[in-house]
Image: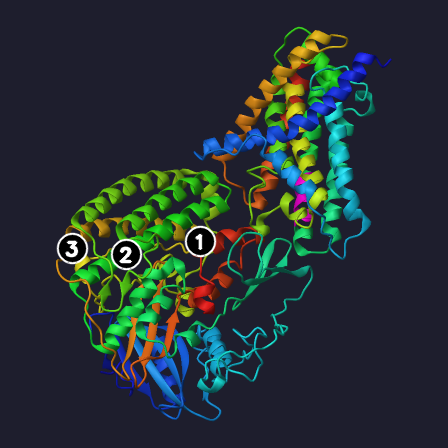
Amino acid sequence: MISISGLIGQAFAIALALVLAPLLLGWLGMCRAWLQSRSAPPLWQPYFMLRKLFNKDVVLAETASPLFRFAPFVVFGCMVLACAIIPTLSTDLPLAPAADALALVGVFGLARVFISLAAMDIGTSFGTLGGRREMLIGFLAEPALLMVIFTVAMIAQSTSVATIVETLAHRDFIIYPSLAFAGIAFTFVAFAENARVPVDNPATHLELTMIHEAMILEYSGRHLALIEWAACLKLYAYSCLGLALFLPWGIAERDNFMALVAAIPLLVLKLLVGGFLLALLETVNAKLRIFRAPEYLGTAFLLAVLGLLVRLLLEVKA
Amino acid sequence: MRFHAEPIEFTPQPGVGAPVWHGRAVDGEDLLRYAISVHRHQGRLSALWGSDERERAGGFRLHCVFALTEGWQWLRLDLPAENPTCPDLSGIFPAANRMQRATFDLLDIRHDGPDQRPWLRHGGWPADWFPLRHDAGDHADFTNAPTDYDFVKVGGEGAHEIPVGPIHAGIIEPGHFRFSVVGERVLRLEQRLGYQHKGVEHRLASTDFLTGAKLIGRISGDSTCAYAWAYAAAVEAACGATPSPRALMLRAVMLERERVANHLGDLGALGNDAAFAFGLTQFMRLKEDWLRLNADLFGHRFMMDRIVPGGVSHDLAPEALARMVEQCELFAREVSELRAIYDNHAGLQDRFLTTGIINTDLAHELSLTGMAARATGMILDGRVYRQDYTPPPPYAALGVRPVTDERGDVAARVAVRFDEIFESLRLLRAMAVGMPAGEILTTITPVAGGAGLGVIEGWRGEVLVGLEFDAVGKLARVHPHDPSWQCWPALEHAVMNDIVPDFPLINKSFNLSYSGADL
């Protein structure tokens, strides 16, 4: 049964994601600048970037196939869908039954496949290099992310993100040790998946070290704008997923309009704190050698498995 | 004077500059024999260039500068006007390869080596036109016809090439790097440079020596003091002039300030290349403060045109020296704090250690010089006392402590840069206290037919300028030689056992000049 308030809430959540995602990146940029004792760019710097890119003409390589032009829309669509099914303000999301947490991993995977294919489409060595590295990171990060989701799903007895949030946020407060392991593993994966330090460096101009940036070197104009916006949305989606799984308090329940209104400032506060911590971790770390990335993501996987074992051995009553 | 019982008779160059001997080889055999003897005595090839002497001596001339422990030997070999051919030195000194090819591109002085590919000529001028020949004419209007370059191919299962540049994603100088890789592993790197060739040597011919001084100071902006001093030393040697002790000390002050500025910038950039942006902002702040004091003290942030033939053009008042000392003390504290952060950062050290290794034997074979050579454990510094070597003034009186590190990797080059900053800060304080009084500039009258070689230990390595005056006291031929000539091939070897994404870090740890070697 789809309620009107549910539809409004859903539409609002998507709109909020589209607006807040670039701001989250802007906030990250500000925090990074402050931590490096530089004067910070304005919060809406990513908006300037998007406006600039949308106003520019697209320069297409002669060898570009329709896939190359198509991919940015697929990637952007995937990220909007991901933001739609992750409860940010309310668990009353009509779109939520469309995809559970496992399908969410699949949505991220679909976007990855398309951006990698598009990267190799032109035939430059950098695109292939980036696509290859992205796949290496992806195939190591996805199992770890799945393990994290299994752990949380076992607590809620459901893989639907909305149900998980309802379970964790609105029942009696219990400390789950398994969630601590899963939370650390999730943080590891989030850095790798969003092309942040220590796995990738979004600020680099060194084409030989790039992962995500190498894949999008050939993009320009509105295509690049969509990809950059999608990258903001991905970061926002991961942040919200982390908040939903590990700090779900404050997300509104079904048919609770006042709680929905109250959830907005709380979400912004959580994102501000989370963004600052992310910037802090990025600032104190250097980028890993690319062949250390498997070790890094292996650690994430191991922690996620530990979380699952803790859940199975200690928390499930016989 | 003779070296190693070889028949070539050398005469010492007069003046107070680095110890240089001039000699003349009778024929190609003579040159080859001497080169082998230098190699056997752990010597290096410092520079190689050619000149068109058909108007003065009826032929061409090949110039080789060899470096032994005692100093530098400038050996000339006269070649005939028709089909000038010189022996191939690249079998003895691999560093000769590119210099020989550049000499051919500019002058049609052939070599009988196996590598006959062009080096500086990228199709900007026809293959039968040689820009440094006096009869080549000035403003030749050629259409650009880029030619294919025969890169060495690497075959085998899974091997493929990654072409990088000459236009890069960042705003840097142009150069092409051809990587042959399997996956991420680098099998081979081949560089193609020369994109910045702009005819500096041609421009320098027939100018007066003061105009030449300005141009030389702009060959490589980050080494303007080293070039200006090497040029001034060469002019002074050719004209028999001696700058005052105060002028020499002021030159050393500028050279050391240039060294510190560049090391600061590179240390920050090295942190940034490992995504440790904190390092970049901190070191750039320090470098900016350092350059601002340069502007206050010398009226120019990079101290261009402050070192001139005969002395220096800018004096320092006692208050200025006091400010300098104060800043050195502040920097010594701040840089050691940053060094502690770099040294204790596990992620950064993981990237630096064992990356881009060059061992001492390889460094010796490649005639490597400067900071990169010292990072392989060689005590190779024109400012430092060694057995049989006395540094030129004012360094003789300063007692520069040699800085070395045996590891040969990026971490070693970082460590050498840090240590050189501290040593330069110490020297700057010592020089400010012991600054002699006196004039800063002596007048110079060009001597017709005079020749001189200046060698200065710049921040990157040894900068050489060899020059000759013509019969009317104008510059006949000037060859500025950047240490990057010797260091670029070393970079090709340094990445060979590493992975592709480590190349930018290794490259930055050398930070070589494109423009300085392309000329």
Residue at mark 2 shares a chain with residue at mark 3: yes
* Residue receiving disc 3: B435
Residue drawn at x 30%, y 68% is B230
Whether A138 is among the magenta residues is yes
Q: Is mark 2 on a helix, strand or loop?
A: helix
Q: How crowded is mark 1: few (under 14 residues within 10 Å), some or many (20 or more)?
A: many
| Element under disc 3 | loop
The amino acid sitting under disc 3 is Met
Residue B254 has which mark? 2
Q: Which residue is drawn at 57% across and 73% down?
A: B122
Question: Please, what is the dominant secondary structure of the magenta stretch?
Answer: helix
Q: Residue B509 carries which label?
A: 1
What separation in Å lies between label 2 and label 1 (alpha carbons)? 23 Å
Q: From the image, state whether disc 1 or disc 3 is nearer to you.
A: 3
The N terminus of chain B lies in quadrant: bottom left
Query: Picture coordinates of residue B335 (x, y %)?
Result: 33, 42
Q: Which of B265 and A96 is in front in this view?
A: B265
Asked if labels 1 and 3 share a chain, the reply is yes
Whole-percent x, y for residue B404 in the image: 32, 55
Is-magenta flag for residue B253? no
